[in-house]
Amino acid sequence: MPQRGALSFPQLSLESIEDLSPPGGGFLRLVRKRYRVHYPDGSQSDPFVYDAVDRAALDAVVIAAHFSDDAGVRRVFLRSALRPPLTLRAARPSPLADEVCDGALWELPAGLVEPSEQTATGVTEAARRELHEELGFDVPLAALRALGPSTFPAPGFVAERHFFFEVAVLPDTRGEPALDGSALERFGAVVDVPLLDALGMCRSGAIEDAKTELALRRLAERLA
């Protein structure tokens, strides 16, 4: 088992015993496997079934595009996003009595890394493409800088990695976003807000997207 920084991870390992995944699938594919855990003392668990989801374009990029305005205030671009899975919460009890789940989020631009982009350079190319599609900025590849290491946003059910980037842009060069043809992206709003205000929106809950908050905090740390 590899080391996790200065921490020594327990000597646990997973054994895949049987693939029970149903055939077919659309954008997402259900992966159902029977596993066994092997423990440090040589014992092992009883077999158990675990469900996960997979997709061809598994990983994603997240881009913090920013600029300094005439007053010297650092501003960052956000985009409205409509997320259908959130509406599944609408009919369920919630610990938050006033929770509203209409699918609406404010996010940093983000998008999937295509199967043909599964290299270090390809991931940066994906960030460049998504920046143009979602915000309308066309920047050279070298302008995009990695913003810390990648992370697993939901490892309990999907192996997706998020790759973070930041890029300084000139707001006057922003064109009309190319978009990707999705019905969910039409009439989406693009706004720029002071970075400190965006962080305040994270603290207040106005920004609920975890990848966006992480990228904003990393950006503020880098620019400090």
Image (cartoon, rainbow, N blue to C red):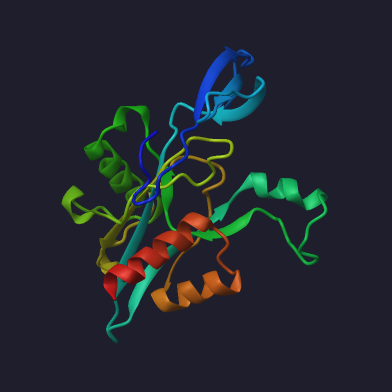
Side of 208 where 88 appears, left or right: right
Residue 200 position, x and y percent, is 51, 76
Q: Residue at x 80, y 65 (%)?
A: 97
Relative to residue 186, is residue 198 depicted above or below?
below
Quick one: quadrant of the N terminus? Answer: top left
Between residue 174 and residue 44, name the one nearer to us.
44
Relative to residue 100, is residue 68 depicted above or below?
below
Residue 151 position, x and y percent, is 42, 47
Between residue 20 and residue 142, name the one nearer to us.
20
Q: Residue at x 54, y 58 (%)?
A: 209
Side of 124 where 104 appears, left or right: right
Q: Residue at x 57, y 30 (%)?
A: 53
Q: Residue at x 52, y 25 (%)?
A: 14
Residue most extreme to the bottom:
71
Relative to residue 17, is residue 52 depicted above or below?
below
| The image quarter in which residue 68 lies | bottom left
Residue 143 position, x and y percent, is 19, 56
| The image quarter in which residue 125 lies | top left
Q: How many marks?
A: 0
Quick one: quadrant of the C terminus? Answer: bottom left
Residue most extreme to the front:
41
Residue 212 position, x and y percent, is 46, 59
Between residue 100 and residue 188, name the one nearer to us.
100
